[in-house]
Image: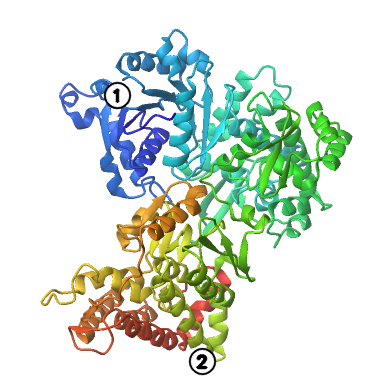
Amino acid sequence: MARRIQKAAVLGAGVMGAGIAAHLTNAGIPTVLLDIVPPNLTDEEKQIKELRNKFALNGIEVAKKFKPAPLFFHGRLASLITPGNLEDDLELLSECDIIIEAVVENLDIKRALFQKIEPLMKWGAIVSSNTSGLSIASMTEGFGPMFKQNFLVTHFFNPVRFMKLLELVAGPETDQEVIDTWVDFGTNVLGKGIVFGKDTPNFVANRIGVYAINKTIQLMIEGDYTIEEVDVVFGKPMAHPRSAAFKTADLVGVDTYKHVSANCYDNLPEDDERDVFTLPEFIHKMVENKWLGGKTKGGFYKKDVDADGKRVSLYLDWKTMEYVPTTRPNFDSVKATKGVNDPGERVATLLNGEDRGQELAWKSLAATLAYTAKRIGEIADDVVNIDNAMKWGFNWELGPFEVWDAIGVADSVAKMKEMGLTVPALVDEMLEQSEGTFYKREGGVKYYWDFASKSYIQVDKPESFIFLPDIKEVGGVVKENFGATLYDLGDGIAGLEFHTKMNSLDEDIITMLHESIDEVEQNWNGLVIGGHAEHFSAGANIAMVLMAAQMENWEMLGEVVDQLQQGAMRMKYCSKPVVTAPYGMAIGGGCEVAIHGTRIQAHAELYMGLVEVGVGVLPAGGGCKESVCRMLAGIPGDMKGVSRMPLLQKAFENIATAKVSKSAEEARSLGYLRPMDNITLNRDRLIYDAKQTALGLYRAGYNAPLPPDYLVMPGTDGAALFLAGLEQFASGGFATPHDVVCGKQIAKVLTGGDVRPGTVVTEQHLLDLEKEGFLYLCGTKATQDRIEHMLATGKPLRN
């Protein structure tokens, strides 16, 4: 049975410790953050609490200012942290249910700290270390049974907010309840993906990931490749993140990467490929030069300014130790992978090439697969934990054993042996005794080959993880077209998934939205709109909008607007609850769909906003209308003499400046999420949580809302105020001429159009204004230029 975690402590306020503390508060957990008292304080300074707590306070500030987004979901969550120091405030640990040590990677320092912690632990408290290299045995030697039973390693990956992986490593005496508690807390509260590792140096992800990078560097030197050539191959074509090998090292920090490599070399004397963890001289020189990556503005790559003042991208020539301009190299094998969406098929396509890119890819992958197979039983018990570690810790699209299946295990093993690679016997045994793959699927269930039992075992999947492909595999599709699919989620709840490119809203999606509501009204208890793509929806298909505008096909464009608006209104007033489950980007039309749900069950990492002004239009799928409804909902329609302008001003700023939230919590502060809407930290739980929300509403006797009677508009007087502000912005250089044109149309909608102040309007009135403004803007050359520029460059045009 899992213990309840209500308060936490983090010891060490460096980048990792502060990141862990910030994420604990993201989950609503009050947290104590302690660090050492700064050395060299004067006697007078030693009396000032803020100075004694300086390191903890600085850690909080760094987490607030972290780029590209703060480590807190919202700045106000920092108030849940109690800063302190390790001399004055250790007694605070007696109130904490979990205590996470994240101090410097020094065994003596950690043990000395644990000696102070042990007598302060309350009954049932759990102590963990965020170490990445020290053994549990060395850290806990000589401590009492209670300490050892309540101790484990909790290895987070940095930045903690964004990285899914949490490696758990238990000692021989760790109580099972302690493990169960961290599995439940890590999965359901912190939203992490749990990997069970063994007490070996660098555990699972770093052991394999660093080997893969180091082996690639060896091959780079042997084959005389450039750093840029390596990254061209080892990014998306290899089903790895775009940061590939060297940009990943820059993100982590070259010094950190060197430390992890050295830790493997120093502590793995029996590893048959120990030499791979020996770094080449040029990397040691980089560390000496402080070329450490992003944190020093230069590592394997850097940005600079040329003689003309233009920003240029440079990469390190490892032979001359000089930075040279990037050249965007390419290989035919890499070109062949363009447009291949399935990651396994993409890797197979790359390996089917016949050039230097393919040669490098195959040699590195073959060595990595063979090395990883040898680690089964040593670093983790099964292929699932290793694959998940690489997907969640290094952002690979597929784990090594999933890649192996994709390229063909038997054929690739034969080629490895031809190269002289040693493939462990357990792989040969698997090929003889299994179906020839590490994984298989049957009846919507995924199985993996277990080397211990020599049989396929079902991959563990909590009931709270709903995956739509599993439902499709067992015939759970209600209806579908090219753009969307309606599923049976069970318990009378249907689920609608979009699957166009970037889930952009096209005719197929809008049609299926209407058909889904028809179906749910008649036969279901509720509807969930969500999915598993990278983004919920990037909005309307602007290429279609541009084509229609250039052809002056206003009737067709108007019909599209009508259909989207009607779909949104049908969602809002459906007799059954409609729960939207946005995640990733929900911008433009994607935001409009999301905010028309009965409830929103949002993933915590939500980048939501009405960004249409970036392409020269305004939200016309109900976004302006619903913004007005949200902002004015707290003021009764019969309340006279109360200005609505401050509230409408917020809506205007959101839309006219294309504000996008950096989290679901920030989306709430922008008004896109309401107090009644919920947030899920674990993406794998999102559809389940949305389903439970819909089911709860239905079982509670859900009734559709009444139309608002409180839309009291300031009319032309309010629009004039917005216009005056716009012109001030333009005169100050903060708004372009077409920004002003767009802003006028947005202001007209948000203030009710050409009506007298105090006029009560309907939602349909605002929808009509949206449509009118949208079509007007589409007819301008400046808007068409913006759309063309966005399609060509992916960036907004400031005209």
Which numbered dot is residue 504?
none
Q: CA distance from mark 2 to mark 1?
A: 67 Å
Say above or below: 534 vs 107: below
Q: Which amino acid, by three-letter code, is at mark 1?
A: Leu
Residue at 59%, 32% in the rendered image: 206
* Residue located at (59% from left, 30% from top): 284
**Mark 2 or 1 closer to N-term?**
1
Residue carrying label 1: 93
Element type where label 2 sits in the image: helix
Say which residue label 2 marks.
555
Q: Splitting the image into 4 quarters, where does residue 50 fall?
A: top left
Whole-percent x, y for residue 744 in the image: 32, 82
Rendered residue at 52%/72% (across/down): 513
Measured as percent of width and height from the top left, residue 175 is found at: 47, 20
- Work out whether residue 94 can be spotted: yes
Assign a secondary structure to mark 1. helix
The scheme the figure's colours follow is: rainbow
Q: Quadrant of residue 452?
A: top right
